[in-house]
Amino acid sequence: MNRVGSHFLRLLPLLAVLFIVDILSVFQGYWWKDTYRSIYWTLSVITVINLIFPKRPMMLRIPMDLCIAVFVTFRVTWHRQPEVVERFIERIPTLSPFIEITMAVVLILLLLERFVVNKRRLIIVFAIGLLIITIRDSFSPLKLWMNVILLVVIFLLWHTILHYRSLDHSTFSKLMKRPHAVFVPFVTVLAVITMIAISLPHGPPLLEDPYALWKKSKGESVPAFLGNKGYGGGSTPDLNTSSGYSRDSSQLGGGFNYDYSPALTVTTSHKGYLKGETKAFYDGKGWIDDKLGTERSIRLQVPIDPPSEPLADYSIVEQKVIVHREEQQLALFSNGDPQMLTEMQYDASNPNEEQRIELLPDNYPLDDYTWNDTTSSLVSAEQERYLPITSYTLASKALIIDQQGLKEAKAEFGELSSLEDEEARQAYLSVPDIVPARVHELAVTVTEAGKNDYERALLLEQHLRMNYSYTNKPDLSLLTGESEDFVDQFLFELQQGYCDYFSTAMVMMARTLGMPARWVIGYTAGSNNIEEMYESNPYMIEQMLQETSGTFTIRNSDAHSWVEIYFDGYGWVSFEPTPGFSMPLQFGAEEEVDLLSDLLLPPVSGEDTLAADEGWSLTDAQRNLIWWSCALLLIAVTAFALIRYRKQVVLKLRNFRYISYTDNQIIVLEINRLLNKGKRIGLPVGTSMTMREMIEHWKAHYPQLKQTLEQLLVSFEAAQYSKNSMTSKDVEQVREHIQRVKKVWRSKN
């Protein structure tokens, strides 16, 4: 073995460990912390031993490494049942499943070291690792570009070591006399590429991942970890803004980039959208902050008493909100209208000391926030200093949807309305003159089939969801410049956008029909690990847990806007016009049904109904499962056939490539390819050398190939210089000799 074997090859186990750690790290959140501790500590101990004793026999190493895994797992999981110390056998149940996973990782490490012995196999392993990371990236909110970078660096280092390992001792010794000639170009190229990549301007991706494209083509939402909404917070729409909650929505339009960083963590008794504030005044460009109603201060443990409607039923939702943003919390978010703040914690530390969390006392006056009965908003007051809130607990009341009652109610401020402010009533019905008449005409056309205001509202919602597409980067080149109104541009020109476009359009269309409507901003319900695992599997969607309580992560990408329409006696009812999003509403005792089924679908005949009852049908999830299973089975069979008959396939492809060549030309080309291969592994090949000189050098390096190389030389000279025509049998014989040479090279390298 050459010098690279004694010095650099001991780095290969370390690279294998780094490869495994890089892949495993993308599954954070799915495994328990003790699992990762067991794996990381086990791999660390094994790596240190490998560096000290790099030549351990495999028969010794396998049991030794597995014993290390058992011992480390035993120590890591000790805290789970420290009282069980009498007998080791009593601790075995507490080791599961940590011990199984850790030992599996150790075996994968051993297999990886034994399998990756040449560059071809390294490329296969690298491709598998990259595929795992890219699939995980499509089904998670994580930013995995650092994992990809680390994987590429590991691949380059591993590939470099395998390349120099294949060199003979004399060639490697010559290289090591001038190491800068090897390492300086490598480091320089890597640094230049990295600097260029970092300095390039950020732009929208040219291609979208296949899973997202497939979901959007079906009009479905990409799982909850994909973002919803972006607020630019400026006077001009900017494609470089990031998603997140903002109170400045005076200039709608443009696009945004997703920001997946966490904003809130909510533990709630009922999952739902989190309302921040509502807005009433639209000026053709955005929503302006003209004040409505009266703001009043609130106190901890003192009821807020939001308005209640006489015909409405409410459910009480308990929720605790942990704040992840260091800046001022712009609103206190809740599922429905807040009834009472029961607890609040804040950061009482000074700038130069560690964080010190303190609990505010009961009846504490919250001067930083004000409640408005008219706008149903609990927002921060405008002041220079504010209380750095870290968490708050509140109870809120969420409307229970009574579909039959809403069908009988009017969308108006009638005798049963709790809103008596005439200015507010007019504001929620106002349509600025800049909105063209064709917006009203479209609203009338869309709602023709509706028998009541509630059905008309549902038809507006359904029209926007079914006929316009969702994108965070709308194509502004579609704008003609003929219209100055944001809603009109969206409905008749762009016909694509994100939630601001859809919700603003529905508010204005509803108002043109005389329905009181307002614009709501806040967050969607977020997601937890269980939901992400279910949503990533189409078959499991049908079996998703029905529990609506739990702890949910709200990310900046979950910032969202939606619509509320007022119904006399019931108050403000929420609607979700943005395609791909589903609002978790609470319904009454009656069965939840789709009220639009009779309006949008043709009637079903009695015979069709009977046939449907007697037969059976597949759900979308089951149908998807069948298609995916067939596709995977086809891929597996194809892959097996290619692997099983790979030599025949390669031969057919090679013959097809050489279909226009003579047998003489094929022999010359095949031997020239062998020469190029030899040059890449460090054998002497040059234009100043004849074929006989090169073969003589090669025979000195590989004496066992002397006869084979001489036969290749004879075949080359006969094909190149002789006037005789070679036959297909000669071609096959040359290829057999070439395969024999390559096999020896692989065994040496």
Image (cartoon, helix red, strand yellow):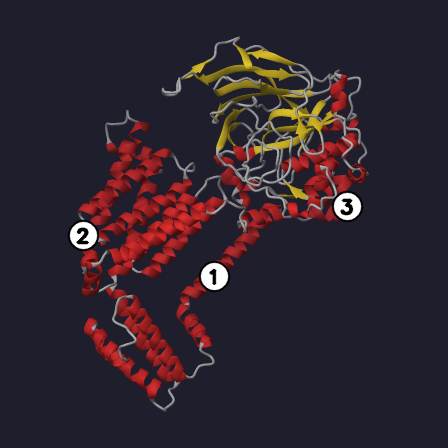
User: Which residue does the numbered mark 1 point to in the structure image?
Assistant: 637
In the rendered structure, the answer to whether residue 417 lies left or right of residue 389 reads right
Which residue corresponds to mark 2? 55
How much space separates mark 1 and mark 3, taking CA atoms?
42 Å
Q: Residue at x 28, y 54 (%)?
A: 183
Q: Does residue 593 appear in the picture of this structure? A: no
Find out whether the residues at labels 3 and 2 contact each other: C-beta distance under 8 Å: no
Viewer-proximal residue, 329 or 77? 329
Q: Position of residue 338 (x, y in %)?
A: 60, 18
* Camera-nearest label, 3 or 2: 2
Tell me the residue that label 3 is attached to: 604
Q: Which dot, 2 or 1, sits closer to the camera?
A: 2
Of callouts 2 and 1, which one flags the residue occurring earlier in the amino acid sequence? 2
Quarter of the image holding residue 146?
top left
Query: Which amino acid, mark 3?
Result: Val
Q: Position of residue 696 (x, y in %)?
A: 22, 77
Check disc 1: other Cα within 10 Å, few if <14, some if 14-19, many if 20+: few
| Residues packed near mark 3 inside 10 Å, few (<14), some (14 to 19) or many (20 plus) | few
* Kind of residue at badge 2: Lys
Q: Residues within 10 Å of mark 2 (few under 14, many from 20)?
A: few
- Measure the alpha-carbon separation of dots 3 and 2: 76 Å
Percent position of residue 297, x then y: 59, 12
As drawn, 182 above or below 730: above
Which residue in the rendered view is the most extreme toward the bottom? 723
Q: Say which of 199 and 643 sits in front.
A: 199
